[in-house]
Image (cartoon, rainbow, N blue to C red):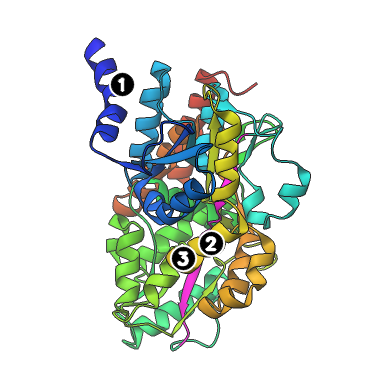
Amino acid sequence: MKLRRWLAGGALALLMALGVLVGSASSRAEEVSILMPSSFTDASADLVKTFNREHRGRIHLSLIRGPLNTESISDLAISSLLLGDAPFDALLMDVTWLPKYAAAGWLEALDPWFGQGDQEQLVQGARLGNDYDGHLYRWPLVADVGLLYWRTDLMEQPPATPDALVEVAGRLVESQAVANGFVWQGRQYEGLSCDFLEVLQGFGGDWMDTSTNAMELDTPEATAAAAWLNGLISEGVSPYAVTNYAEAESLQAFKAGDAALMRNWPYAWAELQKDDSAVKGNVGISLMVAQPGERPGATLGSWGLSLMHQSPHKEAAVEAIRYLTSEDAQRQRFLNNGYTPIQADLFNDPEMLKASPVLPDLLVALNHAVGRPPTPLYAQLSDVVQRELNGLFTAAGSADEAMATSQQRSQTLLRAAGATP
């Protein structure tokens, strides 16, 4: 145990010793540090330089360049927070972390600094996932939702229903126009949970009744959603390889021109417009399919900044958060790195529309954002669903059995934690 504590406490110290702080030191200014995944740290480097220049002698901001992997940076942050001596004032958080961190008392509520007027400027998808137990604990840095990418050179419009997707994708594969109809994320990891949530929403189901904490995974809607995903593989609409696909593998296949449809995140758009893309100029975005009469869903996947409860520099840290999420910062981050803005009016910005003409379609998807279950136990619940779904895809069994097992194991987890009546 002592060795584990020493290793956990030394992780961030090692990162800092290796020079992962973005921003030069200042002995006079109030020091503020924010832990971020490496991709966001790199994308924010110029913003940090400008902030420090404008706040010279008063506030000095440094970014701690954490791991790229979502689970790795969360483990790093939690290891430090459990010891009570985390060397950062704010943390860039994935939307699913908030309930766990807030329930543990690690976060400072942002209500004193961000009011209703601030929230009204946000696009709908950016307003979700920032609250816990009636308080604001997270301010969005980028908006993010799942999208259905489609080939404009192969179809006149994207499929809107599950049957239509199977029909058009199957026809294109049969005619040898493409090797694969539809690529998505079927590996046993969080991406599979995100894909399932979108399909579940489109079949009229819910993962969890948030008013009672009751799971709804053994319903006819959930079973039908799981069966449809499994059928994509068994019927050849999707290649068996999707059972081991994450976002990168799906993007690689679609970018190479090997698939007609792809489920992925907004960042993929910029990749598909590069010169090495076989589908450059022939890609559109839409919502995941839904049964007639049901509302399509787009899994919310945003990142946002949270203030640490233990921070001795709260006012200065909030000033940094405001700067990094300002309209100018959003525009720069979008134009340079493709990160989706959070303010609604930016989706009509001429400069941004010129850079990305699909912004109006992205806004539609953000208005259909669906959050994952807002519980501190989400990681465990997601793991249950991932295991059962991937097992359904790769082994013998039925959707009924997979969803019944998911329901039973999820309810057991919630009862053990005292999270159900």
Placement of 160 over or under 193, stated as above or below: below
Placement of 261 over or under 130, stated as above or below: below
Placement of 311 over or under 324, stated as above or below: above
N-terminal of the pair, mark 3 or mark 1, is: 1
Q: Quadrant of residue 70?
A: top left
Q: Is residue 203 visible?
A: no
Report helix, strand or loop for mark 2: loop
Report helix, strand or loop for mark 1: helix
Q: Which mark is residue 96?
A: none
Report helix, strand or loop for mark 3: loop
Q: Which residue sits at x=56%, y=67%?
A: 289
Pointer 3 residue: 338
Query: In screen coordinates, is 209 left or right of 410?
Result: right
Pointer 1 residue: 9
Work out how far the residue at label 3 is from the one at label 1, CA to CA, in angstroms. Answer: 34 Å
Q: Which residues are magenta?
A: 137-152
N-terminal of the pair, mark 2 or mark 1, is: 1
Quarter placement of the C terminus: top right
Q: Amino acid at mark 1?
A: Gly
Sort mark 3 into few (<14), some (14-19) or many (20+) by Cα contacts within 10 Å. Answer: many
Q: Amino acid at mark 3?
A: Gly
Pointer 2 residue: 340
In the rendered image, residue 71, in percent from the top left (x then y), is placed at: 36, 39
Asked if the residues shown at circle 2 and circle 1 are in contact, with their CB atoms under 8 angstroms apart, the answer is no
Asked if the residues shown at circle 2 and circle 3 are in contact, with their CB atoms under 8 angstroms apart, the answer is yes
Work out how far the residue at label 2 is from the one at label 3, CA to CA, in angstroms. Answer: 6 Å
Q: Amino acid at mark 2?
A: Thr
